[in-house]
Image: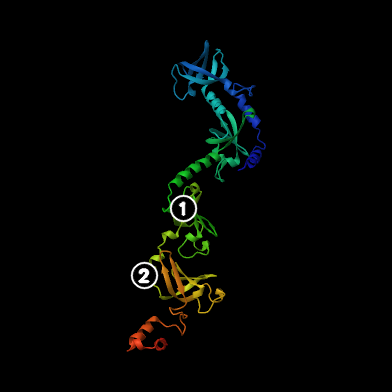
Amino acid sequence: MSNDSLDKEIEAALDGVDLQALGARADEDSPSAGSSKRSKSKDLMPGTVSGISGDDVIIDLGPRMQGVCGIGEFDETPTPGQSFQFMNRGRDEDDLWILSLRGAKDLEAWEQLEVGSHTKARVTGQNQGGLTLKIGGNEAFMPMSQISILRDTDASTLLGETLVCEVMEIDRSRNRVLLSRRRVEEGERMVALSEAVGSLTPGSKISGKVTRIEEFGAFVNIGHGIEGLVHVSQISRKRVEKVDEHLKVGQDVQTMILEIKEGGKKISLGMKQLEPDPWDEVPHRLSVDAQITGKVTRLMDFGAFVEVLPGIEGLLHVSQISTERIQNIQRVLSVGQEVAVRVSNIDPGSQRIGLSRLDARGAMIGSEDAVDNGDIQAALNQSPTPMGTNLGDLFKKALEKKK
């Protein structure tokens, strides 16, 4: 949030809230009433415990100066000789200084407040703009938008609670302190995110829930408020055209962490890596010169991609589509069309398959000119004098057999 936006937000939140009045009430409760511009640290008095009388702790303040402080203000029963800082609240009828240990701690906390520091504050009230709080005996205010990172937080449930807050603004001359609980929560969340991201490693499997779907992929919450992106190319080993046809918001998915960048701000996830690799089946189901039927999946200027096995595509180059020169591939083939092709080459290392609609001798597969290699070999085997056999006659016999 920019400073200008924050200033406008604060002004709107403070509309109708008299912080001067709040500060005045705080001054009335302190021994410095009527001199609020005087440094509050001057109201602190050092003293040493000299003894205990009933519920009072006797404090030596200096030569011929003594005061009393209620024993209930000490965390533990003090012992003679211990020294503390006290707030002076005036004198009693016996001319003893009335001291406050808690008041002194409140004053010290007030003096130590700085913008950006964290402090504990007790929620004392609620109004349209936000919450009123007390830091010790000093009043503070928290705008509604600074209460929590959760938008649906019910502010009334915080009444009477003591919160850890960050100081957004402090003006001691005006007794004005603005606090934010949201900033503390944001810091805690960043620490938690950093620790959670630190436990993630590329290659590990992790479950998540789809939170958002875009044309380029899906965002997945993998826990602790951490989201990663499954790019459309990483959803399945089969080609994915539309993400929402494969994934839905709220769907539980298994993913693999592919990459972590910028300290976890960008996490790439994959789903297809958890699927069986269809290339493992290629050596068992395809071979060079095998003739198969495939389905056209994409058309490009340089050729067509044809799915020859589930999740496996081969490239049918434009030069291998017909015996004639092809000017416009879309006039010859269409997406979804089934075509008979021959496997011209297989490169497992690059996961590439070359296809052709021409047989080994350059004739269109399925045409009358196409001759099966097996038929030619059978014709050769049947010839009593192979060396003297006319090749044209062999083709003729093979074609006749094919018919």
From the top left corner, tell me how far across and down residue 280 is, in percent: 38, 65
Q: Which residue is mark 2?
A: 284
Q: Residue at x 61, y 21 (%)?
A: 32
In the image, what residue type sits under mark 2?
A: His
The N terminus sits in image quarter: top right
In the image, what residue type sits under mark 1?
A: Glu
From the top left corner, tell me how far across and down residue 127 is, in percent: 62, 38
Q: Which residue is more in the foreground, 113 or 352?
A: 352
View extreme (top): residue: 64
From the top left corner, tell me how far across and down residue 287 is, in percent: 39, 72
Report the Cα–Cα distance between label 1 and label 2: 33 Å
Q: Residue at x 49, y 48 (%)?
A: 264
The C terminus sits in image quarter: bottom left
Q: Which residue is more in the foreground, 243 or 89?
A: 243
Q: Which residue is mark 1?
A: 259
Characterize the local packing of mark 1: few (<14), some (14-19) or many (20 or more) Cα atoms within 10 angstroms.
some
Helix, strand or loop under label 1: strand
View extreme (front): residue: 388
Q: Residue at x 44, y 82 (%)?
A: 370
